[in-house]
Amino acid sequence: MVRKSGFAHEQRGLTFICLLLVIVILGIAASLAVPSFRAIVMKATQQTIAPIYKAQQQAQVRRTLKEVYTAQRLHWLGTNTYGCDGATASASNPNGFATIGVQIMSSARYTYTLVADSSTFTCTATANLDDDPTDDIWQIDETGTLLCISNDSGS
């Protein structure tokens, strides 16, 4: 007795349903992997760019403090006293040191404070560069000594 299977020939390969199933599984896997990949790329980018940004900000504050020092020395030579006692200057108040001829850049992240009398001055610059609890604090005095009091660069 001969038995018929209903198929004229034996099936080989994948059916259309199998191909769709594979495509759906790959799509689900990709949809799970892409957000993780993006998060890894963002974290790596932040870890690379943040130190560069902080270094640029710190270079800018050092330049500004040296400019304040030079302006204070010139002011002292003309008046025999240092100027702007108690004055503050920042991006939102760029002309706070106008008396000594220093203007703060509009991109400055630091707030500058001057304490001065006839023989001494100290200019302190303070900023939080990365919104953590630590402030970045720099200071210059009448001797030209530039100090980093607190480093927010994390390095």
Image (spheres, rainbow, N blue to C red):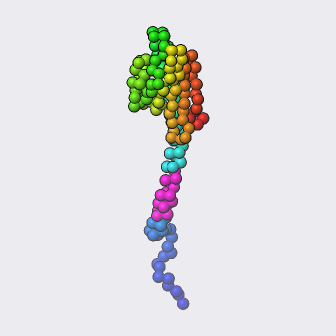
Residue 22's place in the image compared with 152, above or below, is below
User: Which region shows up in magenta?
Assistant: 23-37
Q: Is residue 24 one of those drawn in magenta?
A: yes
x, y (%) of residue 77? Answer: 48, 9
Question: Where the N terminus falls, by quadrant?
Answer: bottom right
**Prevailing SS of the magenta stretch:** helix
Residue 16's place in the image compared with 64, above or below, is below
x, y (%) of residue 16? Answer: 44, 68
Q: Between residues 137 and 105, which one lies in front from this camera angle? A: 137
Q: Quadrant of residue 91?
A: top left
Is there any visible trace of residue 12 in the rendered image? yes
x, y (%) of residue 41? Answer: 51, 46
Q: Quadrant of residue 135?
A: top right
Residue appearing at x 55%, y 20% in the figure: 141
Residue appearing at x 54%, y 27% in the figure: 138
Is there any visible trace of residue 19 in the rendered image? no
Question: Where the C terminus falls, by quadrant?
Answer: top right
Residue appearing at x 47%, y 27% in the figure: 112
Q: Is residue 34 one of those drawn in magenta?
A: yes
Q: Between residues 41 and 122, which one lies in front from this camera angle? A: 122
x, y (%) of residue 115? Answer: 50, 23
